Image (cartoon, rainbow, N blue to C red):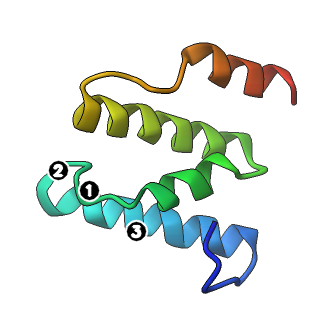
Amino acid sequence: MRDSLYLGPAQNEEIASLNLLGHFNKDLSYKNVNIQDIQTLMHSDEMMTKYYGYLNLICYELELYKKMKIKPSMITKTYLNQ
């Protein structure tokens, strides 16, 4: 999460989402995306925002590492526990 600027969860998620989209659209690559922006979205209370965060994490890992570090079962368990 963002420690330097705390406006509230919804505002931080909006800023993270806009940062993520902006950095990705510079060159259509995840290489300039800040992982903290993705993690902010993943820790959201809103299911759709959380899903968007996990989706971006998967794309980020596939592009940078050519494999997924997160296991799909971890995502499923997160959704089943709510």
Q: Spatial distance from mark 1 to mark 2, Cα to Cα? A: 5 Å
> Residue lying furthest top in this view?
73
Residue located beneath label 2 in the image = 28
The amino acid marked with disc number 3 is Asn
Question: Which residue is disc 3 drawn over?
Answer: 19
Q: Kindly state the secondary structure of the residue where label 1 is placed.
A: helix
**Residue 56 x %, y %:** 43, 41
Label 1 belongs to which residue?
24
> Hey, which residue is sitting farthest left in the picture?
27
Instruction: Tell me if residue 25 comes above or below residue 79 in the rendering.
Output: below
Q: Is residue 28 above or below residue 79?
A: below
Q: Amino acid at mark 1?
A: Phe
Mark sitting earlier along the chain (3/2): 3
**32 relative position to 42: left or right:** left
Q: At numbered mark 3, what does the secondary structure look like: helix, strand or loop?
A: helix
Q: Are marks 1 and 2 in contact (CB under 8 Å)?
A: yes
Residue at image point 27% right, 32% down: 65
